[in-house]
Image: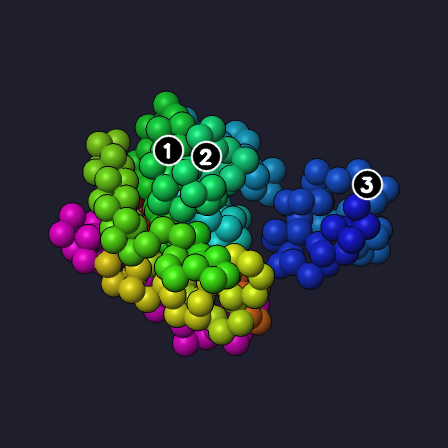
Amino acid sequence: MAHKLLMLSMMPTNLARAILLTLPLALLPLTMNPTEAFAAAAQADPAYEHLAPASPDPALPNVLLLGDSISIGYQPFVTKALAGVANVYRIKGSEEMTVRPKNGLRLSTDSALANLDGWLGNVKFSVIHFNWGLHDVKQQSGKPTQQVPLEEYKTNLRQLVHRLKATGARLIWATTTPVPPGADQGPTGRKAAAELPYNEAALQIMKEEGIPVNDLHALVAPRLKEAQRPANVHFTDAGSKMLGEQVAGEIRKALGK
């Protein structure tokens, strides 16, 4: 347990806060001093790790964020920016999957196809902001292709778009954020720039389907030193804030706010 807690101190603050809420208070000083630990837990967004906001306002439109751990990072900033404007929902992540995809990947287009209906639930969404990609481009050591090859990714994404369109929500596609050099460490990593052909394919599909694009890749690519953790696809708090503010802005446009 101690080594897991130590890892929290190396995470972006907004990710660590969500995890801190699940830990006994007595363990928190292992990662930070008690005052800092209590403050982090107290300030954490109660809706952060839940599918639904803590207290959705029935008078406001509902917005759904579909994505991976990148959306975990920026969701609190979206929620804050849209306070009083929309109820922001986000899937929990891998623990929210009821069906495991054939390749075992979490939050890839394969898993999305298997779990989308459960993620959508019975909520009527006005806007759905969505992305899949970083889990598709993972590549096991010694394997010649990504775990969801590009052609399969395109097929999956077209099916997902058609199913999302059937909800009647206004859709916004977010481009997959950069894979930096060094992110291929471990048995299942990602090659630098592996997202580029996937983004190109996705952009073509969105053009054909008439879906607006939130180009998060273009937003952060010139600012990776300040926005992204070294040799890691995840973002610093500053980077997540940057992403969240742009996501919130695009959702506001879609809502006409």
The residue range painted magenta reads 202-229
Q: With respect to residue 221, does 199 lie above or below?
A: above
Which tag is nearer the camera, tag 3 or tag 1? 1
Q: Is residue 4 left or right of residue 141?
A: right
Looking at the image, tell me whether mark 3 or mark 1 is earlier in sequence order: 3
**Mark 3 surroundings: few (<14), some (14-19) or many (≥20) residues within 10 A:** few
Mark 3 touches mark 2? (CB < 8 Å):
no
**Distance from Cα at disc 3 to Cα at disc 2:** 33 Å
Q: Which mark is residue 114?
A: 1
Give the amino acid type for the residue marked by disc 2 in the picture. Arg
Of 147 and 153, nearer the camera is 147
Q: Is residue 86 left or right of residue 10?
A: left
Of 5 and 125, nearer the camera is 5
**Where does residue 191 sit, x and y in percent of width and height?**
44, 67
**Mark 2 surroundings: few (<14), some (14-19) or many (≥20) residues within 10 A:** some
Mark 2 — residue?
A: 100
Mark 3 — residue?
A: 25
**Distance from Cα at disc 3 to Cα at disc 1:** 37 Å
Q: Residue at x 46, y 34 (%)?
A: 100
**Where does residue 200 sit, x and y in percent of width and height?**
25, 63
Q: How many marks?
A: 3
Q: Main secondary structure of the magenta part?
A: helix
Mark 2 touches mark 1? (CB < 8 Å):
yes
Give the amino acid type for the residue marked by disc 3 in the picture. Leu
Q: Residue at x 78, y 53 (%)?
A: 3
Q: Residue at x 43, y 59 (%)?
A: 143
Which quadrant holds residue 149? bottom left
